């Protein structure tokens, strides 16, 4: 549902080199609700390393092929995986005078990888942030984490870092990541049902290394070996740990009540059946799947790292574990043997619903366009 207009509409050119999953959901949901007009340049998901390093060339060529058919553009909005310097260089001179904003949903400066080294994706994000007029993040944790890791990155370079940190920091802002909660799941579960046995654990993240699926598998196998009563829903997109999960499904047998990529009504039903949502992410920038589960009344069991401590009020930090597999097993064992009453945390999650953030998005881009127009008049 679109909100009442507050200012003149603007035409936003959006470019995304990895139009898939969370990126696709974010821009589709925003454009469906925004008062502004959009032209979108996108590429399907694929080799993310090439998408982040070379995708800007293809996106620029898309724009050049369509340029003469487009209405005048007021603002350029780039996903955080697009190289702003390359995109703007390849579209010269047509976008030179327009304000440029980038929206970052993952910090490439410390994106968790096995055998981590600074990636070319980190260079792309640093140079893009430096030349953009506005650098926007999906939450306060990601903004702070990006600036912290940028300082480390520049310190390791040792020389010729100029004013990069100061200039980027001055342009940073926050636009909470909008999530389809009410439209997708209905009203929030403010008063969760009483605990039941056997407890149902939920995994609703990618089956990926950076999501910590290896730790969750170890914990499930341990509880299974101890013959502790529990059930599990293993939802999520098969990724680099698909084989691990397939083996786990066979081992757990009838304990698994749902598995695989669940969408639409099936996903909503899975959240309703679950009691405890478990996360093990190495460095979660936001935690959309966690917010969805809390909205539906699940008790979260979260590692005390990444964005998780900032998303829960301090009085509920007992729902955090220290991030070790050992404590994860202890907490899951305790919850399986003595299911805990679920506190009503859905109101925290509801703040991310698009109905609560769309107006701020539109106002932010309207202000950026107006400020650029006023500056150009003073020249």
Image: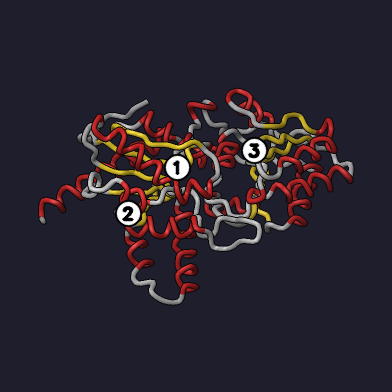
Q: Earlier in the sequence, mark 1 or mark 2?
A: 1
Q: Residue at x 84, y 48 (%)?
A: 222
Q: Which residue is mark 1?
A: 17
**As drawn, 249 above or below 140:** above
Question: On residue 132, which mark appears?
Answer: 2
Q: Secondary structure at mark 2?
A: loop
| CB atoms of marks 3 and 2 within 8 Å | no
Q: Residue at x 61, y 35 (%)?
A: 297
Q: Position of residue 60 (x, y in %)?
A: 35, 42
Left or right: 198, with 73 as reference point: right
Question: On residue 204, which mark appears?
Answer: 3
Please name which of the two marks, 3 or 1, marks the residue nearer to the observer. 1
Left or right: 296, with 135 as reference point: right
Task: Tell me the crowding category of disc 3: few under 14, some 14 to 19, or many 20 or more residues within 10 angstroms, Cα based.
Answer: many
Viewport quadrant of the C terminus: bottom left
Please name which of the two marks, 3 or 2, marks the residue nearer to the observer. 2
């Amino acid at each position: 549902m679109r909100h009442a207009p507050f200012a003149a509409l603007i035409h936003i050119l959006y470019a995304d080199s990895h139009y898939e999953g969370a990126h696709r959901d974010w821009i589709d949901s925003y454009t469906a609700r925004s008062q502004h007009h959009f032209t979108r340049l996108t590429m399907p998901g694929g080799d993310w390393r090439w998408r982040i390093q070379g995708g800007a060339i293809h996106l620029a060529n898309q724009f050049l092929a369509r340029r003469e058919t487009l209405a005048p553009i007021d603002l350029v909005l780039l996903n955080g995986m697009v190289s702003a310097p390359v995109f703007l260089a390849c579209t010269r001179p047509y976008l030179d005078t327009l304000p440029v904003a980038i929206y970052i949903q993952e910090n490439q400066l410390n994106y968790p990888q096995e055998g981590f080294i600074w990636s070319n994706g980190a260079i792309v994000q640093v140079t893009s942030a430096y030349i953009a007029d506005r650098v926007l993040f999906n939450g306060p944790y990601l903004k702070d984490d990006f600036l912290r890791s940028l300082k480390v990155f520049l310190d390791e370079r040792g020389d010729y870092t100029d004013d990069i940190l100061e200039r980027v920091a001055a342009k940073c802002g926050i636009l909470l990541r909008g999530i389809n909660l009410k439209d997708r799941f209905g009203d929030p579960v403010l008063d969760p049902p009483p605990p039941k046995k056997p407890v149902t654990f939920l995994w609703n993240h990618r089956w990926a290394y950076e999501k910590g699926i290896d730790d969750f598998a170890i914990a499930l196998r341990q509880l299974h070996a101890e013959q502790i009563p529990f059930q599990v829903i293993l939802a999520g997109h098969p990724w680099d740990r698909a084989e691990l999960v397939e083996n786990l499904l066979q081992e757990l047998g009838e304990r698994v009540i749902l598995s695989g990529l669940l969408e639409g009504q099936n996903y909503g039903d899975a959240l309703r059946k679950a009691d405890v949502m478990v996360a093990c992410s190495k460095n979660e920038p936001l935690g959309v799947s966690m917010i969805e589960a809390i909205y539906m009344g699940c008790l979260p069991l979260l590692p005390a790292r990444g964005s998780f401590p900032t998303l829960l009020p301090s009085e509920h930090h007992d729902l955090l574990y220290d991030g070790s597999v050992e404590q994860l097993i202890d907490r899951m064992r305790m919850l399986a043997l003595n299911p805990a009453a679920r506190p009503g945390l859905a109101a925290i999650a509801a703040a991310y619903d698009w109905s609560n953030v769309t107006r701020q998005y539109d106002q932010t881009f309207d202000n950026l366009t107006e400020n650029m127009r006023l500056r150009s008049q003073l020249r």
